[in-house]
Amino acid sequence: MGMQSVSEEQRTFEAMRPDLVRKHPGRFAVVCASRLLGVYQSVDDALLACSRAFDAGGLPEGAPVLVSEIADQVSVRVTARPYTRGGGVVAAEIVARDI
């Protein structure tokens, strides 16, 4: 793995991955800290759910959120940090995306 650190979200997803692959292959998991927030049909649905959770107060501003494909060989993984822009608009800074 080299010098790259593994986030709490990545460790949580990896611990849950075998069960998620059995139950939800091809879908997308949303993880914040050590908590699975949900499983969604598409990456867009997962990002929208993150935005809605943040807007409802379920995610603190700037908290890293991992959206990962549920598969043995993950090809899509996005880490985002939700925040509020002027006027109360919810946005997410995309930190990393592995394809």
Image (cartoon, helix red, strand yellow):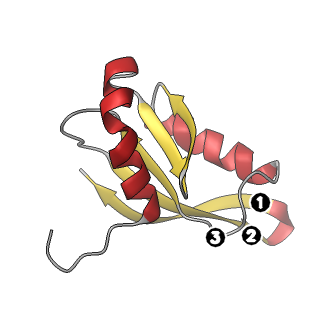
* Residue drawn at the location 37% of the way across and 56% of the way down: 11
Q: Nearer the viewer, mark 1 or mark 3?
A: 3
Residue holding disc 1: 89
Q: Could you tell me which secondary element the residue under label 1 belongs to?
A: strand
Residue type at mark 1: give it.
Val
Residue holding disc 2: 85
Q: Could you tell me which secondary element the residue under label 2 belongs to?
A: strand
Graded by Cα atoms within 10 Å as few (under 14), some (14 to 19) or many (20 or more), the crowding at tag 1 reads few
Q: Which mark is residue 32?
A: none
Does the CB distance between marks 1 and 3 fall below 8 Å? no
Q: Distance between the Cα atoms at labels 2 and 3? A: 12 Å
Q: Quadrant of residue 21?
A: top left
Residue found farthest to the left: 2
Q: Is residue 17 above or below residue 93?
A: above
Q: Quadrant of residue 28?
A: top left
Q: Is residue 74 above or below residue 94?
A: above
* Residue drawn at the location 50% of the way across and 37% of the way down: 44
Residue type at mark 3: give it.
Gly
Tell me the quarter of the image containing the N terminus. Answer: bottom left
Q: Nearer the viewer, mark 2 or mark 3?
A: 3
**Which of the pair 48/28 is nearer the observer?**
28
Does the CB distance between marks 1 and 2 fall below 8 Å? yes
Graded by Cα atoms within 10 Å as few (under 14), some (14 to 19) or many (20 or more), the crowding at tag 3 reads some
Residue holding disc 3: 62
Q: Could you tell me which secondary element the residue under label 3 belongs to?
A: loop
